[in-house]
Amino acid sequence: MNILVIQTSRFGDLLQTTPMLHALRVRYPDASISVLSRYNVMEIYQDNPDLDHLELFNIEEYTRRLMSAPQNIFDAYIELREAVDHLKAMNFDMVINVTHDRFSTFLTHLITSSRIKGMYLSPNKKLHIKINGLWFQYLRCTSNFRMVASFNLADIYKNAVGGSIETQRLFFHISKDSISKADTLLGPTIKDAESFRYIGFQLGTSTGNRRWPSEYFIELGNRLQNEMNTKIVLLGSKDEKKIGEKVIEGMTEKPIDLIGETNISVLASILNRCALLVTNDTGTMHLAAAVGTPCIALFFESANPFQTGPYGEGHIICSPDLDCFPCPTTFECNDKRCLHRIPVETVYRLIQDRLGKNPSFQIPQPIGMRMFKTRFDPLGVWDAWPVGRLNLKKKDIIRRLYRHMWLRFACRSREWNVGSTEPVLQDELKNDLRQWSQNYFLKDPEIQKWLSDFQEGLETLTGIVDRGLGLIKAMVLSIQNVSLAPAYIKKQSDILGVLEKKIIQSGQDDLFVGQLTNLFQLELEQIHDAPFLIMLNAWKQVYDNLGTRMRILEEEIRLMREALGC
């Protein structure tokens, strides 16, 4: 077996792919596994025992030259053709495109393979976009409903190749050379490192101002160095120097400033020296999780803790308690209320608790923010569990219901090896729901109405879906009668098209059924190119899938009512 994984995204995304590589190695122990990535993050995959080959493509330089002048187009074409010819010559049995952007999708199409997972282009002349794989389809269909996304990206990637319940961490190899360089950067303080603890501060983010205010880092740093016998280490890229200068200027005892001074390998060694990292949602956070350093992870604006929270056990996630959080990635917010919802005092107390001998994770939830600890459920799936008790909100209910529905539906698929039967899985999820409900206050009088609205939305869809299934079954039977088939099928297809528009429209901007109808639409788009009879059977399967998901959700709503006592 010869496998290629295409992952050309950013630093953190590459780290989130490492559990997938390990799951591939577990499932195909004798396979040759290659990764196609970009040059500037090649250190992430070096010395990874689950990887046999690393193929590099300088996407940034290629794009720059392609766009800079018309005369460069031919050279760019030659370069891309040579890269594709090189990859095709490696005769991959399976290509997995994790990066669902235009370039990687087109590249997947050009390489060709008998088995493709992720996004690609259909081989016919129309080049329809296709997405192969249950978990990749889930990822695509939830893009419009990120606020209620249920799974960490690392789990989505891992489960897309079958999953591995034992794989509950990101992977990064720390070299002896990087340890030596890190100790040199830490300077004379390394000699006395046993008498204090390093705490890392990741001040910036790769996307604009989606970060905790500098003055909060200053206040926290002063308290930690004055009261807890710690030394603060400032981390980040060279682009974050100005933020670092402001923090250094405001601190009474100067921190160790390593902003812009490390490559990825040395940064990993620095993080490994730290007792804890206080961080925004960045690649540095994921690297800390990979080397086993606990994180206090702060999420703002469009950063979604349920999708990109630190992957591992025992990290703390802090986020604003706002109905608009997380906002859409394309939304320009002029308010920025969320940046000031996480108080310094709370983060300080979290650090005190997390660095104690027996962390209790029992810090009271302040008004205006929410806190979660990371853990894995009995199925090996990452979860964000409330620290203390929270007020239950609509998005909490929807997120939990869809999480359980999807786990039960995926269990029926051969793509995900959960290691247990569906009845056992249902018992595990029922127990999970009981425990989960105990972490929330049921103060909102609308809770009963939310569940009823969800149920009514499903009942409305059920009537349309049942009618659609009836039409498809009738078309299958009509094919046996050649004289009736063409006209009859045309009429039934037109009626079916109207029903499908109703299904899709019912989910637009609807948090309750939107994920269901988005996935239904996506699955419909996958069946265009097949011969008619095959397409008809696939058409029926799309309706069957929607019906199954709705029935599971209806059962989960009933179980949630029992767990909440309403």
Image: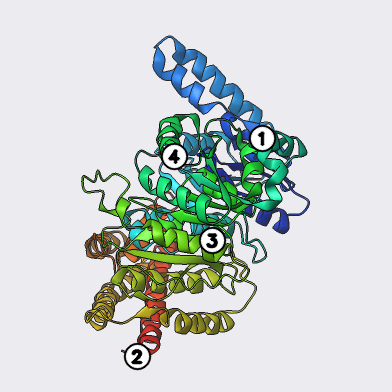
3D distance between C-alphas at marks 2 and 4: 45 Å
> Disc 3 vs disc 4: which is toward the camera?
3
**Mark closest to the chain's N terminus, 4 or 1:** 4
Q: Mark 2 to mark 1: distance in Å?
A: 58 Å
The three-letter amino acid code for the residue at tag 2 is Gly
Expressed as whole percent of the image width and height from the top left, the position of residue 441 reads 34, 80
Residue 68 visible? The answer is yes
Q: Nearer the viewer, mark 2 or mark 1?
A: 1
Q: Position of residue 72 (x, y in %)?
A: 46, 12
Residue that numbered label 1 is attached to: 187
- Where residue 82 is drawn, which disc sits there? none
Q: Is residue 442 left or right of residue 299?
A: left
Residue to which mark 2 is pinned: 565
Q: CA distance from mark 3 to mark 4?
A: 30 Å
**Real-space CA distance between mark 3 and mark 1, rounded to the nearest whole angstrom:** 28 Å
Q: Amino acid at mark 4?
A: Asp
Query: Label 4 belongs to which residue?
Result: 101
The residue tagged 3 is: 315
Front one among 348 and 305: 348
Label 4, label 1: how many angstroms apart (C-alpha)? 43 Å
